[in-house]
Amino acid sequence: MDHPYSFDIEEYMSKERFKRFKEFSGDKETPCLIVDLAIIREKYEELRKNLPFAKVFYAVKANPLDEVVTQLQDLGSSFDVATRFELDQLLRLDISPDRMSYGNTIKKERDIAYFYDKGIRLFVSDSEADVEKLARAAPGSRVFFRILTEGLGADWPLSRKFGSHPELTRRLIVKAKELGLEPHGISFHVGSQQRDIGQWSTALTTVGSIFRWAREQAGIQLKMINMGGGFPASYIDPTNDIQEYAEEIYRYITSNLGGETPEIIIEPGRSMAGDSGIIVTEIVNIAKKSKHDLNQWVFLDIGKFGGLIETLDEAIKYPIYFQGGGEAVDAIIAGPTCDSMDIMYEKHTYKMPSDAKIGDRVYFLTCGAYTQSYSSIYFNGFPPLAAYVIK
Ligand SMILES: *Cc1c(COP(=O)(O)O)cnc(C)c1O
């Protein structure tokens, strides 16, 4: 008997779809990730429908499986590429360089030269030294400048490390132009799994002021806004629908950019791939630490090092589906490695069925993004997370 303890499966997907995942994974060894390409397609189309004014540059790092990238290529997506290695992969998949941007602010000059040599002409920057590298290694290219955001309201913030204050951004724009580059636009990332739509308002207000300053004070017409990622996938903590995001964001753009109609880019990663994947894992052990321990420990064959690193500080709370019946028991959920930080959930109380047993399969939903690409290669000898694709 199946019994969803922490949630109702239909809040996340139809029963038929879940059944398809389970059947497909039936003969596979655990742990493994199963990705359904049909869901990626639906997510892409949903995003395009709701944000028809935005061009999609899929953030490859979220899920770099060849099949995922190829599917998105076929749908017409462009790609936000972070390293030379991702670039090589995309070239191998016959993706045209004019559908790529080098979106990492942290790059070696020789890697910039490599991208330029392969035909990429769209780059991000957020510092003086990097603008100088770009001028030398990618002469004449279009550059967009990333502004600093706070990451408030995001479950997985991408703040502090990336972007510059508006005052420095203005100087970089001028410097880039002086060095023969083409100042093209402004980018930001409000933080991944951003549940506060208002964060786009804050960022777009700053973008609007930089556009105005560039036009009026520096004689530079910026042409593009890159709004990064941050759109949600379906975890336990609720979010607004993508329609809500789209409507609000469109309003922020029109109110901050006045009459200007810049090109709009988005770089979804999590919202594109997250819902498409399920991780199938097995209960290795169930134990208590003392006779009267109120909590039960459940050890699975996947943990922080096997691909679930976003459980750090319990930041991302995956819906976890146990099989079995009986009472609902509080569970501490931990991984299989010999590292005591390999505990996934202790503060947030997940419930499991009292008659769940060792050897049962457990399903983590919404695991299509930031799982396999994060899994370690040999810690304790565990191999990287295996992945299979439902075509
Ligand atoms: C990781 C990343 C993204 C994707 O963000 P999500 O929140 O996963 O959609 C987009 N742009 C850049 C520059 C990134 O580093």
Image (cartoon, rainbow, N blue to C red):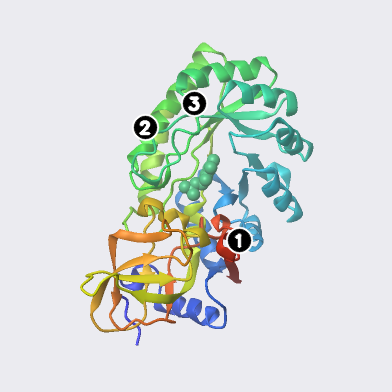
Which of the marked residues, 3 or 1, is nearer the chain's N terminus?
3
Nearest the camera: 382 or 156? 382
Relative horizontal placement of residue 291, taking residue 199 as reference (left or right): left
For the residues labelled 2 and 1, the Cα–Cα distance comes to 42 Å
Labelled disc at residue 164: 3
The residue shown at (51%, 55%) is: 370
- Which element is circle 1 on? loop
On screen, 164 above or below 235? above
Labelled disc at residue 202: 2
- Residue found at the far right of this picture: 117
On screen, 296 above or below 51? below
For the residues labelled 3 and 2, the Cα–Cα distance comes to 15 Å
Q: Amino acid at mark 1?
A: Tyr
> How many numbered circles are shown?
3
Residue 266 seen from this side? no
Residue 264 seen from this side? yes
The residue shown at (40%, 81%) is: 358
The residue shown at (60%, 70%) is: 389
Give neighbour class at mark 1: few <14, some 14-19, many 20+ (Cα, 10 Å): few
Relative horizontal placement of residue 41, taking residue 138 as reference (left or right): left
The residue that mark 1 highlights is 378
Residue 68 found in image quarter: bottom right
Q: Quadrant of the N terminus?
A: bottom left
Label 2–label 1 contact, CB within 8 A: no
- Which element is circle 3 on? loop
On screen, 144 above or below 331? above
Q: Is mark 2 within 8 Å of ligand 1?
A: no
Indicate the position of residue 149 as horizontal and vertical percent values. 42, 33
Q: Amino acid at mark 3?
A: Ser
